[in-house]
Image: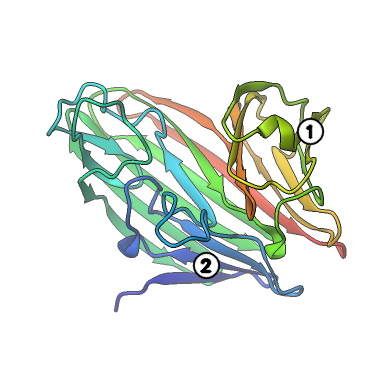
Amino acid sequence: METNEYILGGGELTITIKAPEVCTGTRFDRTGWITQVRLESAGIDFCVPESLEAGQGTGGEGLSGEFGIDRPIGYDEAAPGETFTKLGVGVLTRIDDEAYSFARAYPVEAHEVRTEVGRSMIRFTAAAAETSGYAAELVKTIRVEGRSLSVHYKLTNRGSRNIATNEYVHNFVGIGGHMIDSNYVLRLPYRPELALLGDGGVEDRLELSDGKVTWKREAGGEFYALFGGFAGDAEPYWELLHEPSGYGMRESGDFDVPKLAVWGNAHVVAPEVFIDLALTPGETKEWTRTYEFFGPEG
């Protein structure tokens, strides 16, 4: 019997995960797509959709992972009509001579995904079929314990060519449904230096200081800022707090961070932590992202 979603319970957290078979679009990783995290004792939800308007945006929701946002495997060498690999999604077809864009839709043959489910654990295994010498296996294991959620990745190069790509999670967050304004603070393990300032008057809304980002006013329209990276022993990578309520979440990991981005809109803020991936044939790379959710009671 097919299911549209899986529910994991770890006592304090309830995690909703979209079934890979019902995922659409060619941007976000279909394995372990977490659409909602709920802190049961407080009745607080942490995740929101990318857009509140139906049909707008790229279909993101909750903790939406993506491989190869600017480096999909084999795209540059594929001619129009030939295929390339989008890990976690499938084998896509290049449609023209334009540069790859995550916002465009491409014809796709989805990866085969095997799902193993437990009460507080779920594992997805996706086989990326061989195309132009590229092939891979992705195993993603999600575990819930107390107020902690961990996502463990195991990526193996099954092809005959080197793999060079990246991965991040587009964390679409709006704590308790509160709009993004000066009541939020984003704490970082360093003083963020802008590498790229996107459109939308970011400089008019964000205040950068040593170890944190704050909002001068209501976020208003869409904004994007890209910052430099930091060493993997930073703890945590980021922490987002809604100060009046005292509720927040943080992400940690076990890998070096080449860059960190912050995207947002009036109802959502998305800290995005990147990892660079380079694997020779037969090589395996493992990494883990850990999320913790907290409130004024601890």
Q: Is residue 244 left or right of residue 44?
A: right
Q: Which residue is denoted by mark 2 in the rendering?
A: 16
Coloration of the structure image: rainbow
Q: Which residue is denoted by mark 1 in the rendering?
A: 207
Residue 108 placed where, x, y %? 22, 47
Q: Give the residue type that dot 1 points to.
A: Glu
Eyeballing the image, is 269 above or below 228?
below
Q: Choose between 17 and 281: the one closer to the eye.
A: 17
User: Element type at marker 1?
Assistant: strand
Q: Residue at x 52, y 63 (%)?
A: 121
Q: Give the residue type that dot 2 points to.
A: Thr
User: Element type at marker 2?
Assistant: strand
Eyeballing the image, is 135 above or below 122?
above
Eyeballing the image, is 213 above or below 138?
above
Quadrant (top left/top right/bottom left/bottom right) for the N terminus:
bottom left
Residue 131 placed where, x, y %? 18, 34
Q: Residue furthest left?
A: 81
Q: Choose between 211 and 214: the one closer to the eye.
A: 214
Residue 47 placed where, x, y %? 60, 60
Q: Residue at x 72, y 58 (%)?
A: 293
Q: Choose between 148 and 61: the one closer to the eye.
A: 61
* Residue 14, visible in the rendered structure: yes
Quadrant (top left/top right/bottom left/bottom right) for the C terminus:
bottom right
Q: Choose between 127 and 71: the one closer to the eye.
A: 71
Q: Residue at x 53, y 45 (%)?
A: 170
Q: Residue at x 36, y 46 (%)?
A: 88
Q: How dense is the environment of label 1, judged by Cα within 10 Å: few (below 14), some, or many (20 and up)?
A: some
Q: Is residue 156 left or right of residue 52?
A: left
Q: Is residue 292 left or right of residue 33?
A: right
